[in-house]
């Protein structure tokens, strides 16, 4: 036992040593070890433990101990939690003392007394410091005050460790978001030097983190073509200027253009830069968010192509109708019956073409808006439908020979008659359009117990292999002289695919350039 005059000096030395350990950021176990050492010596105990509170399940678990064996910890944890439960039921003091005594005795026969002190930081219960003594003596206010001073130090250390843990988790979470974001991210300092980039940035620009970090922005983000001011110019002109009251950074800056990647290729990107300010309002960082806008640009391009094809496709029949109608109406001319009939036939055909084009456009936009096709189901005989279509369409050509080939027991299917007719007519019309030299067009089918397959074969221009998968895309037309000279919008096969898929089926094509193509679809019988 220490003699009385040494007491405050010794206590002060211990506290000093512990607070040094805390400020030196020693790990929590080491700080708690020193706290226990000091507590046990100062109140002349034999054993000491620190148990920490787990806010997730409310339990207490021994985190540091002195004077007991590791094997004893599990049993002690149980007793501790039972004790805490009793405390929280507000039971009488004497019972608690008895429980602490039992806990002491269960650890070691000579332990007869336990002095417990809660670890509290900013009113948060963080744990418990307990010192066990091998003699029973009254616990003086001085003992309590000493223990309190150490418990306070331990609470600071535990709180620091928890805070550090939380910050570390936050950082890990943010790093994971940054690394795995689908957008490229670049973090700059106020002088536009690169501090950090993520994986997507590496992929988009071809710059590795290693090579990019430390470089200045202008060496890494090089534009082949830029459609606005670059960040450097904006900064030179005083960006960012504004900060709203809440301190949120609302003043972003957007740049868009064709980026020259490190490997010399280009990529269309849009970059949104957002400033970060210090508490004093000084610009500390700029965070850039890169988005690959290739698809967006492609869609824009497709839309332009679409508008020009559609206006062309609409204009041609309208011009023909108007031309024939004006001619027929000329007051100075007398037309014989044959001319009149021929002209009216052209007017009728061109009106039909307009109607079917408008139908196609409406169906396409409905498919897009509804993300699918609504079916009106009934029994449909594809073989009859094919025969009718051939009968009608063969009037349009005298170069082609038509063969219709279905087995006699070809079954009917459940389907939308109007839409399936549209598909069949489209496939046969294409077969005619894309075999300008003529040849045989075969329309046929076969059936299994589950499904039916329908095909249209021609001996026309064919489709190059690399284009095969794309002919079913919206507005897509194979880039060859046939597309340039034949009428079309690139919608027919897109619609056919949507319609067949709505029937639970598939559509496909086999083709060889200059040999011909076979388009075929399979749909379930029910
Ligand atoms: P459109 O005929 O209006 O251009 P489609 O969607 O029906 O549109 O067809 C898309 C493209 O697929 C056509 O532009 C054409 O290049 C190609 N294609 C379609 N059918 C055939 C065929 N039977 N033979 C060769 N090419 C075809």
Image (spheres, grey):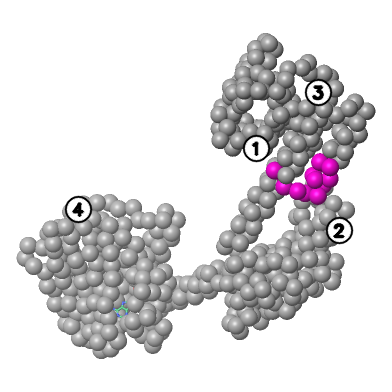
Front label number (1 vs 4): 1
Compare marks 2 and 4 and give the one earlier in the sequence: 2
Q: Is residue 203 above or below residue 155?
A: below
Q: Are marks 3 and 2 in contact (CB under 8 Å)?
A: no
The residue sitting at 70% across, 23% down in the picture is 134
Magenta span covers which residues?
A: 17-29
Q: Are marks 2 and 4 in contact (CB under 8 Å)?
A: no
Compare marks 4 and 3 and give the one earlier in the sequence: 3
User: Which of these two is toward me, 271 or 395?
Assistant: 271
Q: Which residue is mark 2?
A: 282
Q: Which residue is mark 3?
A: 144
Q: Residue furthest right?
A: 5
Mark 3 vs ligand 1: CB below 8 Å = no
Residue 322 is left or right of residue 233, and the answer is: left
Q: Residues within 10 Å of mark 3 (few under 14, many from 20)?
A: some
- The residues tagged by marks 1 and 2 sit, at their Cα atoms, a distance apart of 44 Å
Q: Is residue 223 above or below residue 150?
A: below
Determine if the magenta segment contains residue 19. yes
Residue 141 is left or right of residue 338, and the answer is: right
Q: Are marks 1 and 4 in contact (CB under 8 Å)?
A: no
Q: Any mark on residue 63, and which?
A: 1
- The residues tagged by marks 1 and 4 sit, at their Cα atoms, a distance apart of 68 Å
Q: Are marks 1 and 3 in contact (CB under 8 Å)?
A: no
The residue sitting at 14% across, 77% down in the picture is 403
């Amino acid at each position: 036992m220490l003699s009385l005059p040494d007491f405050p000096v010794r206590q002060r030395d211990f506290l000093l040593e512990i607070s040094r350990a805390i400020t030196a950021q020693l790990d929590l176990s080491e700080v708690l070890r020193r706290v226990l050492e000091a507590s046990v010596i100062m109140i002349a105990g034999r054993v000491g433990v620190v148990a920490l509170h787990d806010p997730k399940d409310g339990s207490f678990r021994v985190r540091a101990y002195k004077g007991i064996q590791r094997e004893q910890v599990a049993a002690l944890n149980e007793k501790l939690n039972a004790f805490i439960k009793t405390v929280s039921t507000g039971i009488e003091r004497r019972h608690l003392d008895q429980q602490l005594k039992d806990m002491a005795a269960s650890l070691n026969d000579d332990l007869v007394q336990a002095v417990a002190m809660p670890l509290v930081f900013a009113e948060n219960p963080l744990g418990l410091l307990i010192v066990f003594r091998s003699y029973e003596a009254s616990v003086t206010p001085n003992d309590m005050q000493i223990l309190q001073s150490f418990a306070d130090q331990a609470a600071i250390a535990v709180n620091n460790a928890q805070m550090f843990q939380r910050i570390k988790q936050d950082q890990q979470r943010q790093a994971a978001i940054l690394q795995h974001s689908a957008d490229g991210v670049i973090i700059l300092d106020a002088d536009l030097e690169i501090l950090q980039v993520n994986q997507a940035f590496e992929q988009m620009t071809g710059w590795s983190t290693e090579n990019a970090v430390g470089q200045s922005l202008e060496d890494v983000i090089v534009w082949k073509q830029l459609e606005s001011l670059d960040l450097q110019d904006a900064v030179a002109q005083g960006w960012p200027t504004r900060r709203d009251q809440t301190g949120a950074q609302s003043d972003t800056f957007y740049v868009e253009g064709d980026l020259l990647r490190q490997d010399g290729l280009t990529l269309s990107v849009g970059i949104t830069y957002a400033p970060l300010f210090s508490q004093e309002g000084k610009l500390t960082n700029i965070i850039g968010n890169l988005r690959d806008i290739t698809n967006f640009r492609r869609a824009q391009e497709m839309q332009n192509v679409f508008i020009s094809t559609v206006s062309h496709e609409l204009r041609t029949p309208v011009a023909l109708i108007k031309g024939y109608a004006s001619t027929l109406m000329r007051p100075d001319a007398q037309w014989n019956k044959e001319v009149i009939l021929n002209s009216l036939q052209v007017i009728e055909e061109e009106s039909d073409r307009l109607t079917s084009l408008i139908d196609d456009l409406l169906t396409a936009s409905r498919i897009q808006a509804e993300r699918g096709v609504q079916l009106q189901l009934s029994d449909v005989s594809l073989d009859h439908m094919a025969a009718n279509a051939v009968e009608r369409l063969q009037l349009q050509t005298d170069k082609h020979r038509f063969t219709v080939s279905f087995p006699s027991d070809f079954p009917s299917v459940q389907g939308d008659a109007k839409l399936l007719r549209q598909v069949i007519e489209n496939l046969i019309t294409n077969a005619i359009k894309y075999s300008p030299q003529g040849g045989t067009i075969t329309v046929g089918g076969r059936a299994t117990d589950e499904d039916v397959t329908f095909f249209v074969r021609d001996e026309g221009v064919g489709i190059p292999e690399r284009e095969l998968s794309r002919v079913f895309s919206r507005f897509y037309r194979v880039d060859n002289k046939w597309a340039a000279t034949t009428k079309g919008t690139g919608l027919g096969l897109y619609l056919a695919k949507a319609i067949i898929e709505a029937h639970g089926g598939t559509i496909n094509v086999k083709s060889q350039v200059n040999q011909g193509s076979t388009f075929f679809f399979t749909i379930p019988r029910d």
